[in-house]
Amino acid sequence: MQANYSHRFQHYHNVITLVAVDNFIVSARKYRPATFESVVGQQHITNTLKNAIKNNQLAQAFLFCGPRGVGKTTCARILAKTINCENLQPNGEACGNCHSCQSFQNGNSFNIHELDAASNNSVDDIRSLIEQVRIPPQGVRYKIYIIDEVHMLSQAAFNAFLKTLEEPPHYAIFILATTEKHKILPTILSRCQIFDFNRIRVEDMATHLASIAQKENITYEADGLHIIAQKADGGLRDALSMFDQIVSFSGGNITYRSVIDNLNILDYDYYFNITDRLLNGDNAKTLLLFDEILSRGFDGAHFISGLSEHFRNLLVGKDQLTLKLLEVSEGIKTKYLQQSTAASVSFLLSAMNIANQCDLSYKLSKNQRLQVELTLLKMCNLLSVFNLATTPLTAMSSAEGQLKKKPDSAGLTPDNEAKTTQEVPVMSEPAVPYQAAKAIPVAETPPVVVAPVATMPKIAIPRSSTTTAIPSLKDMGKVVEALVEEEDPYLKGDAREQYTIEQFSQCWSDFAAKMKAEGKKNALTIFTSNPPKLLSPNNYEIIVENKVQESHFREERPNLHNFLRSTLKNYDIEVSSRIDEKEVVKRPYTASEKFMYMANKNPALVDLKNKFNLDFD
């Protein structure tokens, strides 16, 4: 019987010993900084706090604010321990060996109190805290109160805490920490010394992870630690949590491949490969690579966001001054520098703009995959559009010369060639044809002017057995508009034939009828309401009522001049406009206004109204 109990006792003892030995502590707690020097990425705050302690210039209340996992609560605890240290070091750090430091590290200090405002946010919790403030510290100089997530306090709790925070006892120091400073009352903020914590840089975070891996005898690759640091988005606690997760996943060997597989991150190689295919204009391979990315379970929005970041890194890598903005490892940075030489700045800016538009409209699209594929196809054809936009005008003029030089090669005479030129349909606005009317013979009736083929840019579409890069009609239209805007909108000629006023009036009416047929109602009223006045030979003036009509007239003036000059065969004709602002006559509207209007004409109405005590109805 006794042996049985002894056996059971030994078994339980072994179990307890095994649990005690194998008790795992996460890295975020195990390697939590205990001194100001060990805090990562917040030197501007730790140096200020150390100098304040050494110079005995401590504020009555501190407010630590910033994103999660950057060291706010950690710095608050280090500050509380260092303030009461009995053997302060020359560099402003706590000794860690005195009674005050030991009691704090063991968690049984009576002079440092922590309050979680997320779960203790009522007025009664703050009143209890105020009652504790009245008790002086024991054996040390200060009594410190750390309130975490202080923005969670209710409005009434803030008001109850306000007076104590403004005039605390000389031995009380409050350290408040929050991630949302905008939710704290301005009256609280004005009573605190505010410290804004920064997001931790990727390089600092990767270096810290490497030091922990060395202490834990974990093998690692620098690229893998950089991926963890980038994924953490400035929060060291998140980075340490992912570090522990990947250590368990990889069995203590952190590699680049194990990190991207465990964290479900799209590999850099995909972005480098798809950018190469975009620069080559390979539509088919680009779509196939995107299909492979989707088959691996990645979301289209995640892909397009990463592609925008990739283009941004390529743009940053094109200049030595901005090269420091690349927060990647040295191996990945080398790849960015190599690919940035192959991509032009115009391509990167246009591709980033297209990707940004896709990112904005992705969630609203019913066919999200098609949205991304259309974006990739636009990027594939960017270089074709650039080549079209940079086609020199000399090439077009030489092409025109070749047509005139060899008319017989196509079996056409010069007369037939002119006819053929007029019959070719051209996509252009109604106002454009007047800019190229030199090749059109002048007729007595309003001519139907079409732009010759030689004035339009020749669109070269690359032919291939596998892919065909076709520039969009929108981009082609912009190129044509840019070329058209450089030309003079007015016709030139030497004809100076005489004409009568009746002929001019008839030609004016014909142009008005032409505008009516084209549906230009706003400008039509200008040409039908007031006939033009002759100021001097060939110089006319038309009266418009306001600036809006003047703007419409200026838009139609090139068309009007071209029509009049070509029809009347006189290129000295000029028509100008002048605004004649008419005074607006105020008409009586209300009953009293109507009565005063009539009374001004017949004063006897006032006597009649007063005599019979009449009123308006």
Image: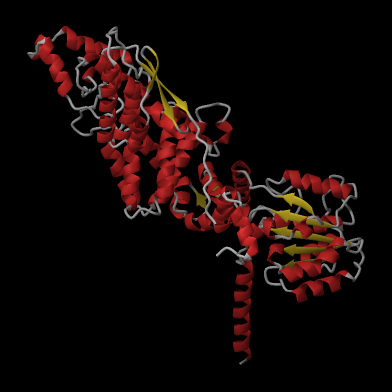
Q: Tell me if I can see residue 75 in this picture.
A: no
224 left or right, relative to 596: left
Q: Quadrant of the C terminus?
A: bottom right
| Residue 253, image x, y percentages | 50, 50
Q: Quadrant of the N terminus?
A: bottom right
Residue under the image location 23 percent in, 34 percent down: 467
**Outermost residue to the left:** 411
| Residue 427, image x, y percentages | 25, 30
Front in this rendered view, residue 542 or 444: 542
Front in this rendered view, residue 129 or 500: 500
Front in this rendered view, residue 384 or 174: 384
Residue under the image location 36 percent in, 13 percent down: 538
491 left or right, relative to 406: right
| Residue 103, image x, y percentages | 82, 65
Up/down of 219 relative to 424, above or below: below
Up/down of 383 relative to 119, above or below: above
Residue under the image location 41 percent in, 42 percent down: 355
Up/down of 559 relative to 135, above or below: above
96 left or right, relative to 597: right
